[in-house]
Image: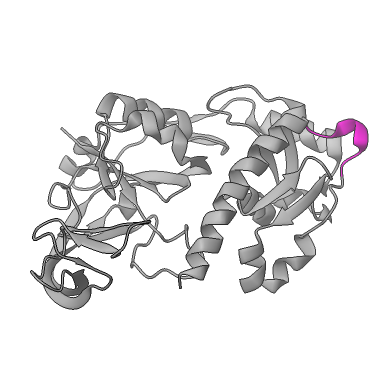
Amino acid sequence: MATFWSCFTRQFSDPFANIYGDVIGERYDFDSRVPNSRQIRQGDVLVMRDQHLVYGWGVVSAVVSRPGIKEARACERCGSTSKWIERKTLTPRFRCGRCGHESNVLVAVEIDVTEFSAYYGDNWIEFGAPVPVRDLRPVFAMKDQQNAIRRLDPTAARSYIDIHQGVPTDLVVEFEDPGEWVRQGGLRETRVRVRRFQDEFRGKLLDRFGEVCAVTGRQPREVLDAAHLYSYAARPVHEERGGLLLRKDVHRLFDSMLLLVDPDDARAHVAPALLDRYPSLEPLNGQRLQVPSDRMPRTELLASHAEAARERWTTLKKDLAER
């Protein structure tokens, strides 16, 4: 019986560097200091997420382990690397839960660990659009909110995957028992069904807006996506006032909450932290939507997305400030 896990990665939550080694869609790297690290097995299902978004899921084909050495921070009195507590308002800043020592500093030490790589690239299914991580919260089997590797309820996880894996792409890969895939030597037979009405929705938006990206203007039909402004999984209807045509790269920024449309001024805004690193994105920033006033999407849908995006921008700013 496969076990379902939620696995936290920083690959996309800090889009400017990948310092943890994870490669989304290929492997998940972790070590023995992480709770549940020794529980992941061949045939388990990994749902990959960061602090804000869930990107897809894969089935583990192999887990490779090796000895390693990692730098850690330790109590200066007893040497504990796991029991000290960082206090946000009290001083001294740190208190050791093992010996009770209080101090404003921790010492750097090297510790022996077992490093793991869980490979799942042969069985990776990316969600058609990243899903807000809050939608995953009811799927967790336990309340261990701080753990990078968290067990999921298998019944709820199957339903969650089935709902989200086809949004907003045209094909949906039906969920099968991952254990069977592994027992068949890593090969899998998948049943694919066409999600009805997706092409129709894109066609309706092309009729509504023409071959025009809402942010960048006229574009070839081939590079334009139909973007939902609401969760299609939560409300499986194609509402014309709930969609925009976006160029594929702009669509990706929008779904990743790195670009928003302010409902008050109908302008696109790029995350300031992103502009600092990638000034070539500046032409997108401040662009008024190229949508006729009588065909604007629903204000409340733009506002909901903008609120979630600004929450992510705050985190990006903090991450950069700490580096």
The one of 179 and 156 positioned closer to us in this rendering:
156
Can you see residue 123?
yes
Q: Can residue 214 be seen in this view?
A: no
75 or 144: which is nearer to us? 75
Residue 95, percent across and down? 21, 60
Q: Residue furthest right?
A: 293
Magenta run includes residue 295: yes
Quarter residue 205 falls in: top right
Of all residues shown, which one is farthest toward the front? 91
Residue visible at 47% across and 33% down in the picture: 164
Looking at the image, which residue is at 62% across and 65% down?
A: 274
- For the point 33% across and 57% down, the residue is 90
On the picture, is 66 further left or further right than 219? left
Dividing the picture into quadrants, the one containing residue 210 is top right
Please give left or right for residue 235 compared with residue 243 in the image: left
Q: Is 184 located above or below residue 24 in the figure?
A: above
Tag count: 0
Q: From which residue to which does the magenta span run?
A: 291-297
The reply, left or right, for residue 316 in relation to residue 227 is left
Residue 71 falls in image quadrant: bottom left
Provide residue 204's location: percent of width, then percent of height. Answer: 78, 30
Q: Quadrant of the N terminus?
A: top left
Q: Where is residue 224 in the image (x, y as percent from the top left)?
A: 72, 48
Q: Relative to residue 98, is residue 174 drawn left or right?
A: right
Model colouring = one colour
Residue 161 lies in the magenta stretch = no
